[in-house]
Image (cartoon, rainbow, N blue to C red):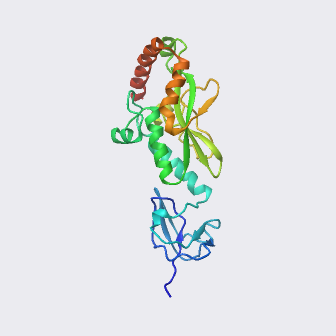
């Protein structure tokens, strides 16, 4: 009889030290045995997974590559992974103008709020953490620069961040727009002590509701919302002020 081998429940794209054996007919979940097992989950490497280390973690017997294995992780592990991935994207400098997609942002090593959150959403999805775009309306110019607040003359901006769906804290607002030095200088965003279990600060001071939108129609819906917020003439002023914000933020 061919022996069965157990493998820890690992998200898509992760690697483990054992191959998955033949499936059980009833596909029942069984508790992880106490024998040593090494598993890499994104940037985290866990060893000695077992009943004592991860009492709530379940495994299945299944055929096929490890990449097709279902995700079952405990809250603390995924919270740490969320912090790691969000902090990694936050490190990228803010740049405007720039394309709003993940690939361009990753290639350039910098990006707008749209591009940086698109990249974060992509990286979260790879480890089984789901997210959705969140549009927030707030003042265009940060209070950090009073002269730009005056120049903006009350203009609002349609800002983009994420709602991240977690199993340990429910939905979380995550905003990685400003890099750490900019946040330390006074721009609102992800603080250095964030633990992945609460909302981060948003890069603009929200005015009114936020808008959860379908990612497939994000660009279209964002433009329609912008058309409600400012006119084409006002958009010229908005672009000028935003360009100066990007320059100043890059110098922080």
Q: State the quadrant of the C terminus.
A: top left
Q: Is residue 1 left or right of residue 109?
A: right
Locate residue 10, reporting x and y percent.
52, 63
Q: Pick whichever, 140 or 93, lies toward us.
A: 140
Q: Is residue 243 left or right of residue 183?
A: left
Could one spot residue 36 in this view of the protein?
yes
Which residue is rendered at x = 49% and y = 25% of the image? 223
Locate residue 120, reporting x and y percent.
47, 43
Q: Is residue 246 above or below residue 28?
A: above
Which residue is rendered at x = 42% and y = 19% of the image? 239
Locate residue 103, reporting x and y percent.
37, 42
Q: Which quadrant of the structure image shows residue 212?
A: top right
Locate residue 26, reporting x and y percent.
62, 75
Q: Pick whichever, 86 or 106, lies toward us.
A: 106
Q: Which quadrant of the structure image shows residue 58?
A: bottom right
Could one spot residue 186 in this view of the protein?
no
Q: Is residue 227 above or below residue 165?
A: above
**How many numbered discs?**
0
Question: Farthest bottom residue?
Answer: 1
């Amino acid at each position: 009889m061919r022996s069965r081998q157990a493998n820890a429940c690992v998200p898509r794209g992760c690697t483990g030290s054992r191959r998955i054996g033949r499936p059980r007919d009833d596909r029942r979940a069984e508790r992880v045995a106490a024998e040593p097992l090494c598993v890499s989950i994104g940037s985290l490497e866990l060893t000695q997974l077992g009943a004592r280390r991860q009492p709530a973690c379940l495994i299945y017997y299944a055929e096929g590559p490890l990449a097709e294995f279902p995700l079952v992780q405990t809250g603390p592990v995924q919270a740490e992974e969320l912090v790691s991935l969000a902090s990694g994207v936050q490190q990228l400098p803010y740049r405007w103008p720039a394309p709003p997609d993940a690939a361009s942002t990753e290639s350039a090593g910098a990006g707008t709020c749209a591009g940086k959150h698109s990249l974060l959403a992509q990286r979260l999805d790879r480890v089984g953490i789901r997210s959705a775009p969140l549009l927030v309306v707030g003042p265009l110019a940060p209070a950090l620069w009073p002269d730009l607040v005056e120049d903006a003359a009350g203009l609002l901006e349609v800002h983009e961040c994420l709602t991240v769906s977690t199993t340990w804290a429910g939905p979380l607002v995550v905003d990685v727009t400003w890099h750490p030095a900019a946040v330390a200088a006074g721009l609102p965003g992800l603080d250095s002590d964030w633990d992945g279990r609460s909302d981060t600060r948003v890069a603009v001071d929200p005015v009114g509701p936020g808008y959860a939108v379908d990612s497939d129609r994000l660009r279209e819906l964002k433009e329609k919302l912008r058309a409600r917020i400012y006119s084409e003439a006002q958009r010229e002023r908005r672009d000028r002020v935003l360009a100066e914000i990007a320059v100043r933020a890059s110098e922080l």
